[in-house]
Image (cartoon, helix red, strand yellow):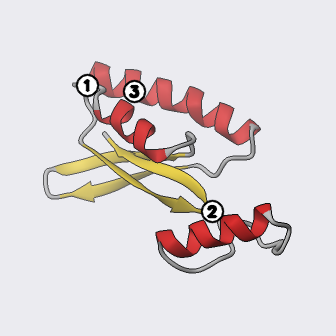
Amino acid sequence: MTSMRGLLLFWAVGVLSIACSAGMPTAAHQVAGAAGRADYIVLGMGCVWGAEKRMAALPGVLDVEAGYANGEVVGRYEVILAHERLLRAGRSHKRNHAEVVKVSF
């Protein structure tokens, strides 16, 4: 497990550096869970559904959670979609959320 954890972390750091250079929101943290220490990283990888499936398939991944980060609008999925339509129509200048996945490993 330790070597897989290192491999996943190495891969995640590579994705993290690409995401940072593209201006995508990312964060890496360690958290204490019921089974001990678990690491997690939040990645902006485009559509969350595909990213969630790809990350969950990696050996050593404990959990994957889809969500949104770094936006200036408050609300759930429907609000974020409505705001995206306003942005595309030129009727808002607030930053919308990025789709992200939280990968615990």
- CB-based contact (under 8 Å), mark 1 and mark 2: no
Residue under circle 2? 97
- In the image, 33 versus 89, the foreground residue is 89
Going by the numbered disc 2, the residue's amino acid type is: His
Percent coordinates x, y for residue 75 in the rendering: 52, 79
Going by the numbered disc 1, the residue's amino acid type is: Pro
In terms of image quadrants, where is residue 70? bottom right
**C-alpha gap between disc 2 and disc 3:** 26 Å
SS for dot 1: loop
Mark whose residue sits in front, 1 or 3: 1
Among all residues in the image, which is located at the extreme front? 89
Residue under circle 3? 8
- In the image, 62 versus 48, the foreground residue is 48
- CB-based contact (under 8 Å), mark 1 and mark 3: yes
Sooner in the amino-acid sequence: mark 1 or mark 2: 1
Which corner quadrant holds the N terminus?
Answer: top left
SS for dot 2: loop
Using a 10 Å C-alpha cutoff, classify the residue at mark 2 as few (fewer than 14 neighbours), some (14 to 19) or many (20 or more): some
Residue under circle 1? 59
- Identify the residue at horizontal 56%, vertical 76% (top origin): 79
Residue 75 higher or lower than 60, as above or below: below
